[in-house]
Image (tube, helix red, strand yellow):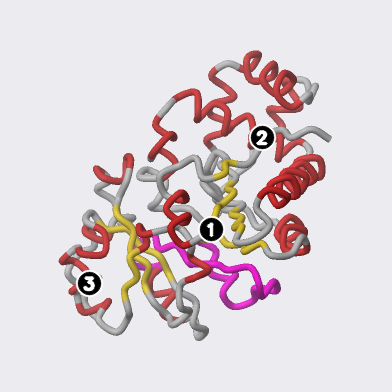
Amino acid sequence: MKSLNLLNLDKNAKTIKGQKYGYKTAVIYLSPYTLSYIIFKQDKKAFQQALKTRYNLDYSINKIELALKNLNSCPFARNCIRGCLNTSGNGRYDHVQFWRAVKTAFYALNRKLFNDAIIHELKLIKKRIPENLAFRFNGTSDFWDAEIVQQALDLGDISVYDYTKDISKFTGNAISQYSLTYSIQDHKSFKAWQSVKNESNCALVTLKGVDDPILKSPIFSDYALIAGDNSDLRFLDPQIKAIVVLKAKGKARKDAGKFIVNNWNAQELSK
């Protein structure tokens, strides 16, 4: 099997910061929420041809549409949709969004072949990077795919991690080596994280990052703050019920919704 180049290996500003800690990170970037279907509808024939040319997948337009029409890559997303970090970095380019959508269609149409291709690529990368390799399946999505996570862990010496908005993963995560950080998208999700009794960390977004004055609000006073923009290596964070703080990027910088903590009202920021 030849490599299909589904993985991004430190080709973005965030994960490359992990190299100063001795790690390299392989990430899959897919289309978030329902964006793959929206992009597909813009030019169905071009989308179909792209699947065939790049991944040798010969599906009818109707088959592709059926696979994408009801697909939601981030089923727990609410207030984060408008300011999604999918648009930061290289995500601001239309051609990047197009190919992420095509890759998402590959996953939706033939998950086994997709997962096999990912594991094949990870094996090739491990030959070059036998130690301190990290793998993140959900770079811009929020799928729960226990099979691909377990297969990656079975390769050995790979740190597998993700952010997720699915709070149930912190009350019943069956894969103990899979490092998960709960992604906050509003006050409601923050309260849900507070109620979880284990020591898993959460991540939230402010306009100025970890130095934002908003973090002096009473609701955050009982928690240690971690500068999440120093690297993306969340599996290295101490699991102490801490808050990983990220600075707003891309469209999020102008988001007036609750995804940005600075937009929470006074009652929400109180204990």
**Front disc: 3 or 1:** 1
Q: Which residues are magenta?
A: 165-189
Q: Earlier in the sequence, mark 3 or mark 1?
A: 1
Amino acid type, callout 3: Leu
**118 over 69 or under it: above or below:** below
Q: Secondary structure at mark 3?
A: loop
- Give me the disc on residue 269: 3
Measured as percent of width and height from the top left, residue 233 is found at: 48, 62
Callout 1: few (<14), some (14-19), or many (20+) C-alpha neighbours within 10 Å? some
- Identify the residue under disc 2: 5
Q: Amino acid at mark 1?
A: Tyr
Q: Quadrant of residue 20?
A: bottom left
Residue 184 on the magenta span: yes
Above or below residue 258? Residue 4 is: above
The first of marks 2 and 3 along the sequence is 2
- Label of residue 162 in the image: none
Q: Tally the numbered discs.
A: 3
Residue 23, label in figure: 1
Residue 203 sits inside the magenta stretch: no
- Which residue ends up furthest to the right in the rendered image? 1
Q: How far apart in space, not on screen, are marks 3 and 1 (Cα)?
A: 36 Å
Q: Nearer the viewer, residue 207 or 23?
A: 23
Question: Is the residue marked by circle 2 packed among few (<14), some (14-19), or many (20+) residues within 10 Å?
Answer: few
